[in-house]
Image (cartoon, rainbow, N blue to C red):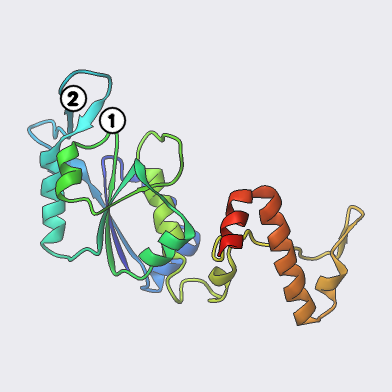
């Protein structure tokens, strides 16, 4: 799977995408991530990529020409399943959307910055807008990193235990149950006996009950969705 990411600050993405699971995925040849500096397509001697917005108002807007030049250059070499813009206006990123995107081969991500991108870029190129939450970030780079991590880990072979991703929180609209490791007793708190029983059926039932209760108490919105089916 390939991600191309357009940013005015690509260095913000280097650390989160070059360590741990994402780095192992790239080393295995399962994931490719290419960062493209929009300033390479900037206008004039100063490589301008933004300008004042028509109609007045605070904040600069990313100009259409550099973005269009970068997108067209990338499209000349690749066919993209989606051209994504990270934006507060977008659909909320959730596990179902991550699952769907993980089935694609090529994704292009545009990181917004300043006051956002010229609306004409959104109209001409963007096929999907994604928000990672109802809050505002300084730019779309962190949202892009979240997107790559959430989608990339679902690619078969990325995780050492391929069943692990299937039992993550949100895969079935339930939060994951509590987990424990050694020692069996710590600070006077003991691991639930059922987890030490070796009885796979009882353990599975306990985990499901815990998932239900945790979701009901902590995320009633998810619980209602689960109940409705």
Identify the residue at horizontal 15%, vertical 35% (top origin): 63
Position of the N terminus, as image quadrant, is: bottom left
Rendered location of residue 211, percent (x, y): 69, 62
* Residue beneath disc 2: 53
Position of the C terminus, as image quadrant, is: bottom right
Element assignment for label 1: loop
Label 2 Cα crowd, 10 Å radius (few <14 / some 14-19 / many 20+): some
Q: CA distance from mark 1 to mark 2?
A: 9 Å
Which of the two discs, 1 and 2, labels the residue nearer the N terminus? 2
Label 1 with label 2: CB-CB less than 8 Å: yes
Residue closest to the eye, 61 or 157: 61
Rendered location of residue 41, percent (x, y): 13, 43
Rendered location of residue 11, percent (x, y): 34, 44
Q: Which mark is residue 152?
A: none
Vertical arrangement, residue 172 with respect to residue 6, above or below = below
Rendered location of residue 26, percent (x, y): 38, 67
Label 1 Cα crowd, 10 Å radius (few <14 / some 14-19 / many 20+): some
Identify the residue at horizontal 13%, vertical 41% (top origin): 66
Task: Say whether residue 169 is visible.
Answer: no
Residue at the limit of the structure toward the front, as seen here: 228
On the rendered structure, is 220 left or right of 73?
right
Answer with the quarter of the image where residue 161 lies: bottom right
Residue closest to the eye, 61 or 92: 92
Q: How many marks?
A: 2
Residue at the limit of the structure toward the right, as seen here: 188
Vertical arrangement, residue 78 with respect to residue 163, above or below = above
Task: Say whether residue 191 is visible.
Answer: yes
Q: Which mark is residue 115?
A: 1
On the rendered structure, is 180 left or right of 190?
left
Answer with the quarter of the image where residue 165 lies: bottom right
């Amino acid at each position: 799977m390939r991600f191309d990411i357009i940013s005015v600050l690509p260095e913000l993405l280097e650390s989160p995408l070059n360590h741990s699971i994402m780095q192992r995925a790239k080393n295995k040849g399962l994931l490719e991530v290419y960062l493209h500096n929009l300033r390479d397509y900037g206008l004039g001697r100063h490589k301008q990529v933004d300008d004042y917005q028509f109609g007045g108002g605070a904040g600069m807007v990313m100009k259409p020409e550099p973005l269009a030049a970068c997108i067209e250059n990338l499209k000349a070499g690749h066919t993209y399943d989606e051209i994504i813009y990270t934006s507060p206006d977008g659909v909320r990123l959730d596990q179902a959307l991550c699952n769907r995107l993980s089935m694609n081969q090529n994704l292009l991500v545009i990181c917004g910055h300043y006051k956002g991108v010229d609306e004409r870029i959104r109209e001409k190129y963007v096929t999907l807008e994604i928000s990672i939450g109802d809050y505002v970030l300084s730019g779309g780079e962190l949202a892009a990193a979240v997107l790559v991590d959430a989608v990339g880990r679902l690619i078969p072979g990325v995780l050492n235990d391929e069943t692990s991703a299937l039992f993550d929180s949100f895969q079935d609209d339930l939060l994951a149950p509590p987990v424990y490791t050694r020692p069996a007793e710590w600070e006077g708190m003991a691991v639930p006996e059922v987890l030490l029983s070796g009885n796979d059926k009882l353990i599975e039932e306990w985990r499901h009950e815990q998932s239900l209760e945790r979701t009901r108490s902590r995320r009633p919105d998810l619980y209602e969705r689960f109940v409705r089916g």
